[in-house]
Image: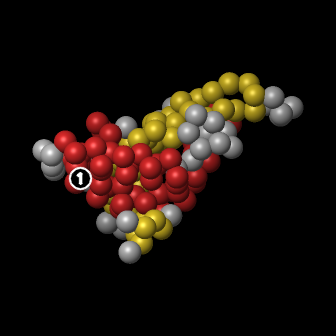
Amino acid sequence: MKRPLFAALASLVNARGNTANEAWRERHRARIAELVREHMPSGGGFDSGTEIDLPYCGDQSLRFRVDYHHMSEHGYYDGWTSHIVTARASLAHGFTLTISGADRNGIKDYVGETFNHALRTEVGE
């Protein structure tokens, strides 16, 4: 069965938080890490990849940390911005995103579009 990545991650985060069995907690954590590694932004400016911030996640929200590597108009790397991306449950839209950090060159719109696309990707269980 396939479902959107945001739903799969929220379900795994919820399952991880609801078990006292350390082996199952580790299995859930490993699957979460695998899904993030396979489907969340990495490369193309997101040169450090995406990290899920598990202590701040629940069944109603997911929080990610990401750095973006900016380039100048001459094609040289010229600095980084750091962002916290939070996806919160929404009855109308599945989820809504908020993005913290500096909006250098309008990067927050790009980060939002990229995360929106990734989190709506259909994944297998």
Q: Is residue 15 left or right of residue 30?
A: left
Residue at 41% in and 41% down: 52
The three-letter code of the residue at mark 1 reads Asn
Q: Position of residue 122 (x, y in %)?
A: 48, 67
Q: Quadrant of the C terminus?
A: bottom left
Residue reaching furthest to the right: 74
The answer to which image quadrant residue 92 occupies is bottom left
Q: Nearer the viewer, residue 12 or 64?
A: 12
Residue at 75% in and 28% down: 77
The answer to which image quadrant residue 84 occupies is top left
Residue under label 1: 14
Q: Nearer the viewer, residue 52 or 73?
A: 52
* SS under mark 1: helix
Q: Nearer the viewer, residue 91 or 54?
A: 54
Q: Position of residue 111 (x, y in %)?
A: 57, 45
Q: Position of residue 85 (x, y in %)?
A: 45, 42
Q: Is residue 11 left or right of residue 102?
A: left
